Image (cartoon, rainbow, N blue to C red):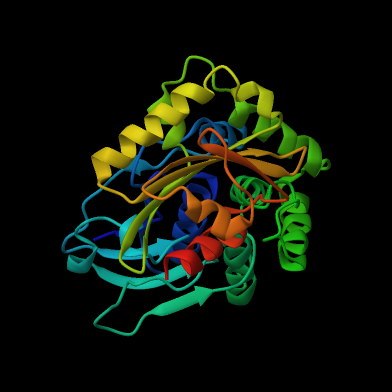
């Protein structure tokens, strides 16, 4: 029976590429593993897999009675509804330890780095397993995506070192050019429904008993989103009502200007000013230097909601 490897709901490039890489490593170490995703893949991830000739994982959302490895999350809100009925063999992540608990000991690699793929690169090295060229390529792309081409405050020297090593294996000479190629795909929004854009990189959080959702769209130029901004604002308000959440926030991140505009649907809009010291106007605010949901945004909101 195969062991499944997957990450959070609304999969992004790190979640998908890391699931594929960890499944490859674990299979070579003697545990047959199959990578899967909890939802449809975003355009950037499809681009990465096609570029390096790697098959997209199947979508699977129920895991009762299965053995699993988790990547890129350990938060119950981002895991399948029946995760407590699965046997979690291990977690590989780069976020804070979440609220998942297990009845048996498990393997845990949780490092304070910019990307799960950076941790998996170290795991290959630790076990003395060679990384295939195509797997190295998608792992490199995952790091470039999660660290916003090394501009994110989450980026560490370990991410840069892993990227250099993976680029050598994958035969990639210009990392910035590859990163910009990816982000141009990520920036394409024309003809895409607002809900799909809102959920493209979206996570639910339980902040001291308060339901908060935070999505993020990263683009090479914020003006790309001008035509759809009103639709996005309306959709996060609708999503807030559907989920019964206190707040839904959508970060519109300009990777060249290195800041984010935050769209706000909240029971108390003042939480944004309390978190960032910026007074919103018309349901939005510009947050200079704010690039990372994980490092710049979630901890600030958690303090406000505590």
Q: Nearer the viewer, residue 187 or 292?
A: 292
Relative to 45, say whether 226 is above or below: above
Relative to 233, say whether 294 is above or below: below
Q: Nearer the viewer, residue 269 or 205?
A: 269
- Residue 23 as seen in the image, left or right of residue 64: right
Residue at screen point 30% across, 77% down? 101
Residue 41 location (% of width, % of height): 43, 36
Residue at screen point 52% across, 30% down? 43
Q: Nearer the viewer, residue 96 or 15?
A: 96
Quadrant into which the C terminus falls = bottom left
Q: Could you tell me if residue 263 is visible in this image?
A: yes
Q: How many marks?
A: 0
Q: Which residue sits furthest right?
A: 173
Residue 243 location (% of width, % of height): 26, 44
Quadrant into which the N terminus falls = bottom left
Q: Which quadrant of the view contains residue 98? A: bottom left
Q: Which quadrant of the view contains residue 224? A: top right
- Residue 80 as seen in the image, left or right of residue 268: left
Q: Nearer the viewer, residue 182 or 299?
A: 299
Residue 5 location (% of width, % of height): 38, 58
- Residue 47 as seen in the image, left or right of residue 150: left
Residue at screen point 45% across, 22% down? 231
- Residue 102 as seen in the image, left or right of residue 247: left
Relative to 193, say whether 257 is above or below: below
Q: Could you tell me if residue 4 is visible in this image?
A: no
Residue 75 location (% of width, % of height): 37, 64
């Amino acid at each position: 029976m195969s062991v499944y490897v997957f990450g959070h709901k609304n999969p992004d490039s790190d979640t998908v590429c890391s699931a594929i890489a960890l499944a490859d490593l674990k299979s070579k170490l003697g545990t047959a593993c199959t990578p899967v995703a909890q939802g449809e893949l975003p355009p950037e991830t499809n681009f990465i897999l096609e570029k390096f000739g790697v098959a997209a994982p199947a979508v699977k959302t129920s895991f009762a009675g299965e053995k699993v490895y988790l990547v890129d999350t350990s938060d119950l809100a981002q895991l399948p509804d029946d995760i407590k009925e699965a046997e979690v063999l291990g977690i590989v992540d780069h976020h804070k330890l979440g609220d998942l608990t297990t009845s048996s000991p498990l393997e845990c690699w949780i490092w304070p780095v910019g990307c799960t793929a950076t941790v998996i690169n170290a795991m290959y090295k630790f076990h003395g397993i060679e990384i295939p060229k195509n797997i190295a390529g998608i792992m490199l792309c995952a790091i470039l995506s999660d660290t916003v081409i090394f501009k994110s405050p989450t980026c560490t020297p370990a991410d840069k070192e892993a990227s250099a090593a993976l680029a050598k294996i994958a035969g990639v000479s210009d990392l910035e050019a590859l990163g910009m190629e990816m982000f141009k795909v990520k920036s394409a929004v024309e003809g895409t429904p607002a809900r799909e854009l809102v959920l493209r990189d979206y996570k639910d959080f339980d902040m001291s008993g308060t339901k908060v959702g935070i999505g993020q769209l990263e683009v090479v130029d914020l003006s790309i989103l001008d035509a759809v901004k009103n639709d996005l604002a309306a959709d996060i308000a609708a999503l807030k009502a559907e989920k019964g959440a206190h707040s839904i926030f959508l970060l519109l991140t300009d990777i060249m200007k290195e800041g984010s505009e935050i769209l706000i649907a909240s029971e108390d809009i003042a939480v944004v000013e309390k978190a960032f010291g910026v007074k919103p106007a018309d349901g939005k605010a510009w947050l200079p230097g704010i690039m990372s949901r994980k490092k710049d945004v979630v901890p600030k909101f958690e303090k406000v909601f505590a």
